[in-house]
Image: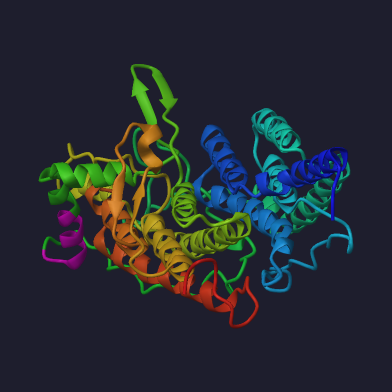
Amino acid sequence: MKFSFGKIAVICMLLVSCSSDDAWRTKVQNAEYLHRSIKQVTDVIVHDIFSPPVASRIYTYVSVAAYEAARHQDSLCVSFAGQLHGLGQVPQPDKGKEYCYPLASVQAALKVGRALVFSEDKMDAFYEGIMQEFKNDGVPKDVFERSVAYGTQVADHIIAWSQKDNYKQSRSFPKYSISEDPATWKPTPPAYMDAVEPHWNKIRTFALDSAAQFKPVSPTKFSTDKESGFYKEAFEVYTAGVKMTDEQRQIASFWDCNPFVMNVKGHVMFATKKISPGGHWMNITSVACKKTNADIVKSAEAYARVAIGLVDGFISCWDEKYRSRLIRPETYINQYIDENWTPLLQTPPFPEYTSGHSVVSGASAMVLTKLFGDNFSFTDSTEIEFGLTARSFKSFIHASEEAAISRLYGGIHYRPAIENGMIEGRAVGNFINEKVRTRKEGKKLADGK
């Protein structure tokens, strides 16, 4: 068969045109769109100084929204509807119509994020920029509008779900009452802030059967007797602070994650803004996704599963904190050991037992190990933007154990809060791994085994 030069030119033009028309489908698969969106939520959480429990709630609704919109790109993925408490069937895309699911996922995540933070202007500026990037990728106008509309439907559904978790009602619950009992928590310097979220156990759990499902053993009985177990636990914290090594100091600072740090200079008090424990583990999730080149669906899946572990971990931990209401090391040591001692880290404004960082680190490590496998080595760069160097770990469990013991080095927890907190957190994480499905039966989770 012979072709004239003119026919060949037309065919070439058609091939180029088809290739150009399809190019956007490849461009939008870049998971960086979602990673950057989650990072934007983190940046605003830090800016707005949300408490660690509240931050975990924000992360979970944002991540679930992102996953529910993205999952339709992978036929093996299943919805969280009917698995997470109170979550009804999520709106579905129209059959037979084309969508850009990465765009819908980002739309859902950012709209939910905007609804849950204070700095809406910061979310709006980021949103306008990333939407323009999708347009620049060449997403056809009808697909763009349809995808944004679908992402909005998912977001509205998730926002409506969030409004029934008892969070708004808890804003008007009474403040924590200081007890005269010497064993109980008292506000600590320099700000002597009120106790944070004393009613957090009344927030609806996401996957856990109840806030007390993994209730830890009781803390060591309070005593001022120098031969008592409690005194010895406090003295261990005191000694660790006095004999701090450079490595221990670096570990404590790296895992500080206290958004409440207050600085006092003369009559002026101002806050140093830091990432929360949940934000730190969400960033580790990002690191793992990027190392494995996880696509947007697998990345959304990972963020959502980790976030569920975080939020239920904080609910479980706070349930115990305001049950035992245990005195912090700083208060005890100043009263009974050394009135001039100060911890390396500023004591967070809530009771001591169990350690929140230990609980959520244990939960996150279990979830991430299920997703990405054992012995997953990585370098954690989370704290670089806060002036600290990156740290490398052999596995998620290795990182979680360092995060936990950092609380003793920092002078803010006794050892039982750390060790029992890890047990509590791992139980939460393992429960979520077993109960919550994101893949059809027999299919692996993300890139894990």
Q: Is residue 265 above or below residue 126?
A: above
Q: Quadrant of residue 229?
A: bottom left
| Left or right of 130 in this view: 400 | left
Identify the image's colour scheme: rainbow, by chain, secondary structure or one colour. Answer: rainbow
Instruction: Name the one closer to the observer, 36 or 139.
Output: 139
Which residue is at the far front?
2
The answer to whether residue 232 is magenta is yes
| Left or right of 114 in this view: 429 | left
How many numbered marks have been drawn onto this rendered protein structure?
0
Q: Is residue 313 above or below residue 337?
A: below
| Left or right of 43 in this view: 238 | left
Q: Is residue 11 above or below residue 353?
A: above
Which stretch did the figure color magenta? 227-236
Residue at 59%, 83% (x, y): give it. Answer: 442
Residue at 12%, 60% (x, y): give it. Answer: 226
The answer to whether residue 185 is magenta is no
Residue at 62%, 74% (x, y): give it. Answer: 437
* Rendered location of residue 241, percent (x, y): 17, 45
Quadrant containing the N terminus is bottom right
Instruction: Name the one closer to the observer, 174 or 365.
Output: 365
* Rendered location of residue 258, percent (x, y): 40, 42
Instruction: Name the one closer to the observer, 26 or 191.
Output: 26
* Rendered location of residue 231, percent (x, y): 18, 60
* Rendered location of residue 139, percent (x, y): 78, 41
The main secondary structure of the magenta stretch is helix
